[in-house]
Amino acid sequence: MDLHIDRKEVEITFDPHVFVRQTERNFDIDFVEETARTGDISEEKSQPPHKICFTKYHGKERQTYVIIAIIHNDFIEVKTVWLQQGR
C-alpha cells in the first residue's frame, strides 16, 4: 500500500481518546509514535486511502502495538491504540 506522505518525517498528532486510554491500557506514547513511523501496515484492518492500521512488535516488552491512524495531507492523527501480548 502506497501512502502519499513520508511517515518518518511527518508530524504525529494524537486524538484525546488516546490519552484517556493510555493509563487504562498501559502503553508508551514513544512506542506509539515509533509504530506510526516504522510499523507494518495491516491491510485487513485498514480502509485506504485515509484510515490505516499500523502494527509493530516491540521485542524487549514482548508486546505488539496496534494503532489506527488517519492520514492527512501533512500529518498523521493517531485515533486509537491497543496492545497484544507477543507477536
Image (tube, rainbow, N blue to C red):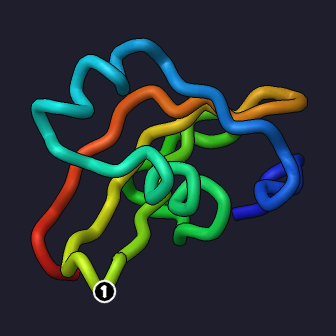
Residue 40, above or below 65 = below
Q: Nearer the viewer, residue 2 or 38?
A: 38
Q: Nearer the viewer, residue 21 or 45?
A: 21
Q: Is residue 67 left or right of residue 72?
A: left
Residue 31 in which image quadrant? bottom left
Outermost bottom residue: 59
Residue 36, above or below 12 = below
SS for callout 1: loop
Residue 12, above or below 85 = above
Q: Is residue 36 left or right of residue 55?
A: right
- Pointer 1 residue: 59
Three-letter code for the amino acid on which mark 1 is drawn: Gly
The structure residue drawn at horizontal position 69% and vertical position 63%, both measured from the top left corner, is 1
The structure residue drawn at horizontal position 53% and vertical position 71%, both measured from the top left corner, is 40
User: Percent position (x, y) of residue 9?
Assistant: 87, 54
The structure residue drawn at horizontal position 77% and vertical position 55%, both measured from the top left corner, is 7
User: Percent position (x, y) of residue 55?
Assistant: 42, 64
The quarter of the image holding the C terminus is: bottom left
